[in-house]
Image (spheres, rainbow, N blue to C red):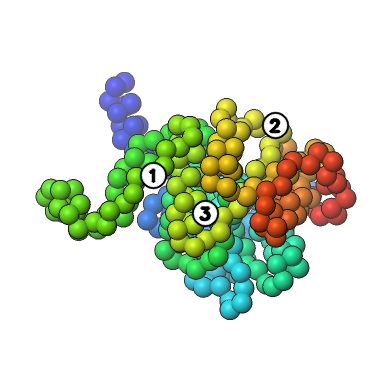
Amino acid sequence: MFAALAAARAHLHTDPLAALKAADALVTDSVGGGLNMRPNTREVRGSPQEQWRIALNAEGFRESRPTPRAAPAGTRRFVALGDSVIFGHGIDQGATLSDQLEEVLPPLLGGPVDVVNAGVFGAAAFDMYRRYTRLAEAYTFDDVILGFPQNEGRQSALAEVRAEWRDARGRPKLAYYLPFERSLLHLYARPTPEPAPLPLPDPTLEDLWALVVDARRAGHRVWLLQTPRPLAAPYAKANEVLTALTTGLDLPVARPVLDHPDCWSPWDHSHPSAAGVRVLARALAEVIATGTSAAPDPGAPRCAAEGAPR
């Protein structure tokens, strides 16, 4: 029994994505580790009566076309990071949050935009942070959209991987082959200021906070979307983490309210429908256009008025 437990632990340690990959074949490893969606995949899900199409490009983004390393000249590029809400679970290809932002943002910003859908099923805050780090090295973009993650179970399960990744991050590969590399490298490393203490100890807050700080240092604007879920309750500290991010980092946040059945997917009732996603897109677009947070608006128009397909 103990041998079996040890073997299972070793397997999970070497492949921390095993559970997610077993749950959904679209989830796979990213180059350099972490989560990605399976590149070059076309799939249809749902029932014969109601279907939703998925198209993933060569980079694993939910895009019907290739994603060039640099945005077209004169185009403001956003990268959307998050879990299945950002990916668009239950949403047909072409109607995801990224797609709808590409429709509503240009008139508000006065020019073309490109919103890359880099959402991944099951992603936690650490997955988003690691994905941002990789994308920032490979692509040029102007803004980062963060869909607040709800997969706290996965975040907790990644504690050991998080510690190892943070310890190794930014160290030259050669260092792994040098004896006493820690004592040698610190002599040549640029001094790094100690991070400011966080308002509360929480791994989700720690990773999102670090992501925002890194993104701003790289010159990227950051926007936060509070993704409502009526049936899947957020983890206990969600509101505290949101408050800490928005007040501690002066992070603009959209807090749309989806208070009608039309706002929710017919597939599982815990992800927004395409009409619900359109409400999210309009609320987030307003925050991006004004640069200021928007308070929850219980009196917002119902999703049926949006006219978007479910």
Give the residue at mark 3.
Answer: 37
Instruction: Identify the image quadrant of the N terminus.
Output: top left
The residue lying toward the viewer, choosing from 40 and 75, is 75
The residue lying toward the viewer, choosing from 255 and 9, is 255
Badge 3: few (under 14), some or many (20 or more) residues near its Cα, within 10 Å? many
Residue at (59% x, 43% y) in the render: 246
Residue 284 spot, x, y in % from top left: 69, 53
Which mark is nearer the camera, 1 or 3?
1
The reply, left or right, for residue 301 in relation to residue 81 is: right
Give the residue at mark 1.
Answer: 195
Residue 11 spot, x, y in % from top left: 34, 37
Residue lying at the far right in this picture: please name it. Answer: 305
Q: Distance between the Cα atoms at labels 1 and 2?
A: 36 Å
Inspect the image, locate mark 1, and give the three-letter code of the amino acid beneath it: Pro
Q: Distance between the Cα atoms at labels 1 and 3?
A: 32 Å
Residue lying at the far left in this picture: please name it. Answer: 179
Residue at (34% x, 45% y) in the render: 194
Provide the secondary structure element on which disc 3 rests: strand
Inspect the image, locate mark 2, and give the three-letter code of the amino acid beneath it: Leu
The residue lying toward the viewer, choosing from 305 and 184, is 184
Which mark is nearer the camera, 3 or 2?
2
Q: Distance between the Cα atoms at labels 3 and 2?
A: 25 Å
Residue lying at the far bottom in this picture: please name it. Answer: 73
Give the residue at mark 2.
Answer: 231
**Residue 34 appears in the figure:** yes
Asked if the residue under mark 3 is in contact with the one under mark 1, i.e. CB atoms within 8 Å, the reply is no
